[in-house]
Image (cartoon, rainbow, N blue to C red):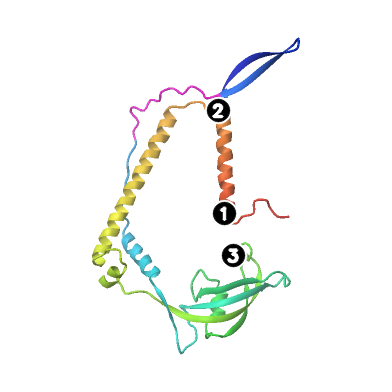
Amino acid sequence: MHLEDHENVVVNGSQPITLHVHVEVMPEIPKPNYKGIEVTRRVKPIADGEVEDLIAERLQREAALIPVEGRASELGDTVIADLEGRFDDEPDADPIKANDLEVVLGDEVIEVSFTENLVGVNQDDEKEFTVSYPAEFSSAALAGKTVHYKGKIKSIGRSEVPELNDEWAQSLDEGYESLADLRKRLTADLIKVGEADADARLRNNAIAKLIEDNAFEVPGTLIENQARSLLNNFAQDMQQRGVDLRGRR
């Protein structure tokens, strides 16, 4: 860090005043030596099954929920319900309300109690059940809590995935002539992504090596300003996510 002193004399009547002004300035940065820096460009190869995984994900996104008729809900069905829940240890607290909640029966990401209580229901049924959430549950607001739910079953459906064929590829309205054409273009896209990622890593590695070989002094003010900027960006991001940074007592 470099400081410059400026001495100014100000006369106020007959009494001189001397001011010493300390100004932080940018250090002199020498011309970097970049010759001889070696970095390696590595392009990640396409993994086996990566293209097929992308196609499978697209198939799932194109799946349609078909209403079931003439039977009660089964594993694999999607139950759509309006739910209201009250905490066992806080009966007077505001209830949990979820309208048009989609519950895929048997899905591993669904708390098992929902599957156990919503198998065998029919449209327009009213259902009451209790869910005891484990202490390690993903939602902190529900972890370790016991909630009594009342629900109204609005509909029951079965997710049907399109058949994987040329007609499905053409139906995507993205110019695919066939399933083979879809695979070919997805492969080309993955190659482009891999090359762009390799170029980015190459550039970052070269910059890191350049900085490592050409150390220079950074003023503390710049570091403080950058830290403050990063903190402000983090705070704004948290507020956009709905996190109250003021804290609660």
Question: How far is mark 1 from mark 2, CA to CA?
Answer: 32 Å
Label 2, on which residue? 219
Distance between the alpha carbons at the discs numbered 1 and 3: 24 Å
Residue at the far top: name it. Answer: 14
Q: What residue is at 34 percent from the left and 36 percent from the top?
A: 39
Give the CA separation, mark 2 to mark 3. Answer: 46 Å
Say above or below: 148 vs 14: below
Residue with the mark numbered 1 = 240
Question: Count of labels shown?
Answer: 3
The picture places residue 93, in percent across and down from the top left corner, at: 71, 69
Amino acid bearing label 1: Gln
Q: Is residue 128 left or right of residue 163?
A: right
Q: Residue furthest bottom?
A: 70
Which residue is found at the position 38% from the left and 65% from the top? Answer: 57
Q: Is residue 212 visible?
A: yes
Residue at horizontal 59 percent and vertical 39 percent from the top: 228
Give the amino acid type for the residue marked by disc 3 in the picture.
Answer: Phe
Describe the element under mark 1 as helix, strand or loop: helix
- For the N terminus, give its image quadrant: top right
Q: Residues within 10 Å of mark 2 (few under 14, many from 20)?
A: some
